[in-house]
Amino acid sequence: MPEQTVVDLLAELVAFDTTSDGSNLPLIAFVEDYLSRHGVASRRVPDETGEKANLYATIGPADRPGVMLSGHTDTVPVTGQAWSVEPFRLTADGERLYGRGTTDMKGFLAAVLAAVPALVEADLVVPVHLAFSHDEETGCLGVRTLLADLGRQPVHPAACLVGEPTSMRVATAHKGKVAVRLHVRGKACHSGMAPEGVNAIHAAARLSTRIEEMAAEKASHGPFDERFAIAHTTLQVGTIEGGTVLNIVPQDCRLDVEIRAVPADDPEALLDELMAFATSLEVGMRATHPDAGIRLERLHDYPGLSMVDDHALVEFILSLLDDRNRERIGYGTEGGLFQRELGIPTVVCGPGSMAQGHQPDEFVTRDQLARCEAFLARLITALTGPEARQRLAEAACP
C-alpha cells in the first residue's frame, strides 16, 4: 500500500468542510478508515445529536499510559472573507499551502496521520494516543464528552501535546476564557413618552461602560503575568444588539461579553463584580417597571493552561525540537481541560502560526510541516527502547 505524504493527507483533510456549524462525521469516517487500513482500531465518542464525534485511538501497548497527540477537526467559517483561492481545496504556491484549516489545525492532524505507519512499525514501549475532537472553535465544547469517556477508562494518558499552531515552539501557558451573554429587559413604549418606559439599550450602555472600566482597572493594577504578551486579564463586549425602530423605547438588548484571565486571576469574581453593578442598575429600572431586569447567561468557558517552564514534560518535548524557545500564547486551547479534568500534564506545540489562522487565504508552510514530521519521528524514537517508560514517567511528573 503506497504511503500518503503529509501534503497528500492535508489535501484530503482540507477538502472536508468541517466548519463548526456543520458535521465533522465525513472527516471522522475518513480517519477511521485510514487508521483501520494500518491496523489501528479507533473509538468514536459522539455528541448528543449524533451529528458530530470525537475520535480516540491508541498505537502501541494499551495497558499503560502514553503520550496523547491532540487536535480539533473543526474550523472557523469562511463566510464574509475574501479568499483568492478555493478554501476547501488545498492550493500549493511554492512554500505555502493554502486552505481553510491548514494552520488551525489540519496541518498537525495530517502530520500525525502521516506518522501512523512509522508508529505501527515501531517497537513502542510507551503508547501514543490520538485524540481528534470537534467544536473546539465554539468554546472547546466537543472535547468534553471525550474527557468524560477517558475518565471512565482504566488507563489515562500520562502526557498530552496539543498541536495548535505555535511555529513548532513549546507553549507552556495560555489564558482561560469565560463568555457570557447579558440579557437586559426593559419596558417598551412610544418614544414620545420615553420616561414611562425603561430603555434597555441605555442600561446596556452603562453595563458596557462598566466593563470597559473593569478592563482598564486590570490593565493598571493586574494581577500581571509577564509570560504573556498582554500580561493582564482582559474584558470586552464583543457584540451588542437591541431595539426595533427609533420611535419605540427598546424593551430588549443583549451584550456578549468575554473575559480572558491570566492564571492568577479569578474570572468568577469578575463576573460577581459585574453582576453586582447590574443589580444596582436594576433598582432604578424596577422603580419604573417591576419586570425590568438583567439576566446573565453563560455561553462557554474553558480553563487556562499553566505549566512551569522547567516541568519535566516541557524539557522532554524541548529535547525533541530544533527550536528550544518557550512561548505563552494569547489564544485558548483544549489543553487546560486535559490538565484540569484529568490531571494530564499538557503543552501546546504544532506547525504554522496563528497569525494565519482564521484569516482569508490561510496557509501553512512546507517547512513547518517538515519540522513537525521531524519532531514526531524523534518522539517515536524516544518512546522505544528499554528506557522509554522511565523517560516518560519522569516527564509526566511535576
Image: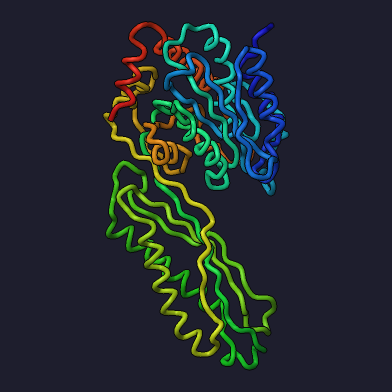
Task: Find residue 65 and report its image quarter.
Answer: top left
Q: How is the image coloured?
A: rainbow
Q: Is residue 158 above or below residue 356?
A: above
Residue drawn at 29 percent across, 35 percent down: 308
Q: Is residue 33 left or right of residue 181?
A: right
Residue 329 in picture, x, y percent from top left: 41, 39
Is 58 or 205 nearer to us in this picture?
58
Residue drawn at 47 percent across, 69 percent down: 208
Task: Find residue 45 and report its image quarter.
Answer: top right
Residue drawn at 48 percent across, 19 percent down: 128
Q: Give the quadrant of the N terminus.
A: top right
Residue 187 in picture, x, y percent from top left: 60, 84
Residue drawn at 58 percent across, 16 percent down: 114
Q: Give the quadrant of the C terminus.
A: top left
Is 148 or 318 nearer to us in this picture?
148
Task: Find residue 267 and report its image quarter.
Answer: bottom left
Numbered-mark total: 0
Is 14 or 269 nearer to us in this picture?
269
Is 271 or 40 nearer to us in this picture?
40
Residue 252 in picture, x, y percent from top left: 61, 75
Q: Is residue 162 left or right of residue 345?
A: right
Q: Is residue 25 left or right of residue 328?
A: right
Residue 233 in picture, x, y percent from top left: 36, 54
